[in-house]
Amino acid sequence: MYAGGRGGGGGAGRGTDEDQKLDRTQTRVVLKRSFQMAGEFRKQAGLALLLVIITVLCTLAGPVLVRHGIDSGIRAKDSHALNMTVVAYIVVVVIAYVVGRWQYVALNSAGEGFLRLIRIRVFSQMQKQSMAFFDREKAGVLVARMTADIESMAELVQWGLMQFLSAFLLLFFAFFLLMSLSWQLTLISLLVFPFLIVASIKFQRDANKAYLEVRDKVGANLSALQEGITGVRVIQAYAREDEQIRRFEESNRALYRSHIHSVKVSTWYFGLIEFAGIGSSALIVGFGGLLVH
């Protein structure tokens, strides 16, 4: 985390130094260290995983029950079967709601505990640094590491991880469920997967660059703000207010542009995901109609 200290005090305004970037080996080391730190929250994470599985199963049970109600109830004109299906559907919805709340609480409890531990470790590590380290590094960059970086991890732990697990398990169980219902339509739905895989790889690379750029600009912006506040007496003594305002406007504008760029990176990818979902549904409906007729 502190490798960037060699860049000098002006490093915040240039872009992320190469020694601040992690290669695959370093990434594996960091991930391994993170899993070791999260060891004390293993039980909560295991409970959250179990609850995610139950929620996914409830999600898949809904369409199956609707299919059963139409085939065995409406088409067969069996009111008892239809009523039982409706009752079962309501039970599944209630279970999904209750388990979903437990899942949210369990996952966020483990995530917040992990983030609290990271904040303490980072702050303790900062206190162990030499005076030369703080001479080289800008206070705004260090604050950004303690706030923006950990906030990004909070989004990952609290929302991204849960969404990733839910999506992966939903895809895994749905594949076998669809194969049991119609292997032909399942294969049709998989036609969009190669495009999604290629798009996801490109998005991962673009998003990583955009995140590093935003992180760098956040540090530069906080540095400009910190310098303007702590050095206000010197700035006013030499009548440098206009120059300081101009520097802050430049850093703020650069931060704005980096955020806009990150939004554009996300927009094309998620738009493509939506289009792939609609296109896959259209293919399934069209091919399904051919199978029926």
Image: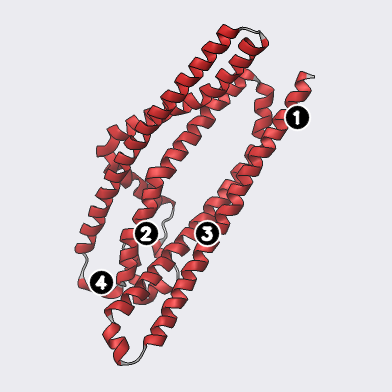
Q: Please say if 177 is above or below 22.
A: above
Quarter where residue 275 is shown: top right
The numbered dot on residue 148 is 2
Q: Say which residue label 3 marks.
A: 262
Q: Is residue 235 left or right of residue 277?
A: left
Which quarter of the rendered picture does the N terminus lie within? Answer: bottom left
Kind of residue at badge 3 = Ser
Image point 31% across, 74% down: which residue?
A: 226
Kind of residue at badge 2 = Ala
Contact, mark 4 vs mark 1 (Cβ under 8 Å): no
Between discs 2 and 4, the one toward the N terminus = 4
Contact, mark 2 vs mark 4 (Cβ under 8 Å): no
Q: Is residue 223 left or right of residue 197?
A: left
Q: Residue furthest bottom?
A: 238
Quarter where residue 110 is shown: top left
Between discs 2 and 1, the one toward the N terminus = 2
Q: Say which residue label 1 marks.
A: 286
Marks 3 and 1, Cα distance to the nearest angstrom?
36 Å
Depth-wise, is mark 2 or mark 4 nearer the camera?
Answer: 2
Marks 2 and 4, Cα distance to the nearest angstrom?
19 Å
